Amino acid sequence: MMTYYDDIERVIELDLPWETLNEANILIVGASGLIGRALVDTLMQLPDKTFHLYAGVRDLAYAHSCFLKYKNADSLTLIQCDVTIPISYDIDFHYIIHAGSYAGPDAFLNDPVGVMKANIWGVDNLFSYGIQHHLKRFLYVSSAEVYGEGDGTPFCEEDSSYLNWTSLRACYPIAKRTAETLCISYASQYQIEILIIRPCHIYGPLFTSKDDRVYAQLIRNAMANEDIVLKSSGGQLRSWCYVVDCVFALLYVLLKGETKNVYNIADTRSNARIYEFAELVALKSGRKVVFEIPDSAVDNHSVISQAIFSTDKINEIGWSPRWRLEEGISHTLNTVF
């Protein structure tokens, strides 16, 4: 029975120039979130680490519980890091991965200002710190939501489409798009290498209790031995990607990507409608899908009906996904049960 923990060990199979990270300090912002935590876990599987990881989090107590297994590791330090305020440390971070952001319907509805600050101010504060502390390369975790509404044709990195800029829900994709431009601006003005990734819908275990995105709600149903509840028709077409595949892709971009470039991250074999994702969770957990659609809609869920993505660009630097949707969901459920 394979789990997430088996999957992250396969990082040693990646054909990557790990020597690039020799003697480097690497700051991972948002290290207790879905992608950030998996990135820390994955890098900690590497033998003979010659770099030092700094896991930047807002809640140190929670982070200590996340990374308890590494408490005696010399190569990992947990630090408190709220990127919406200037950073007060005096540590040289040669690589910064900014994966810290509110990303859920509740935040979009109740704290849209915080959503925008975490992205725009976060990028600004990290660069302002980095240019004074020997920053070499900056990787920003954006979102494939920046593309807007699709027509069934896979989005390439240069594409854009319709997005209602004045809707409250737009706080997230617009903040991401603005932060991307800010990254490019810092790169040009201060000669810092920057890379941007746009992950599709990422899923996996070990999400936080505050994560209210649809994948997390469905997996929580399974964990509680409940039927799998959909609060919409679930007809939206999405690209999905297992979190370990996403982290492997991030590492390919970090170590092989070309500066000032954007890379989509998606598993093109795993394009599925939300109700199909729910049906797979139900199948793997021995439950059924039920619909509990509220009478009135709230302006905090994505109105995008279809959005799928091309990965030709990231495939060219050597990455391809390893786990299909069925396998990723199975490994996720095997981990949480």
Image (cartoon, rainbow, N blue to C red):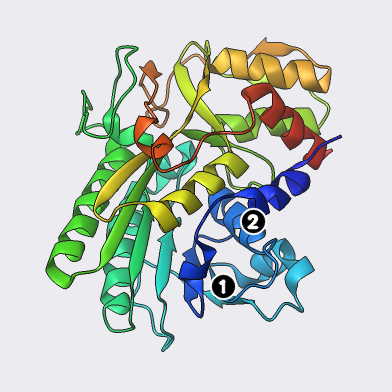
* Quadrant showing the C terminus: top right
Check disc 2 and give the amino acid type: Thr
Residue placed furthest toward the bottom: 90
Callout 1 amino acid: Leu
> Which residue position is annotated with label 1?
53
Report x, y in % for residue 272. 53, 16
**Vertical relation: 133 (above or below) 10:** below
SS of the residue under disc 2? helix
Q: Which mark is residue 324?
A: none
Q: Residues within 10 Å of mark 2 (few under 14, many from 20)?
A: many
The percent position of residue 89, horizontal first and vertical second, equals 43, 85
**Residue drawn where x is 63% and y is 35% of the image:** 216
As helix, strand or loop, the secondary structure at mark 1 comes to: strand
Mark 1 and mark 2 lie on one chain; the one further toward the N terminus is 2
**Considering depth in this image, is 132 or 311 the residue closer to the camera?**
311
Residue 48 left/right relative to 151: right
Q: Give the residue at x 58% y 40%.
A: 245
Residue ID for mark 2? 42
Is 98 situated left or right of 79 in this image?
A: left
Compute the Cα span from label 1 to label 2. 11 Å
Across and down, in percent, residue 143 comes to 38, 40
Q: Position of residue 320 (x, y in %)?
A: 52, 35
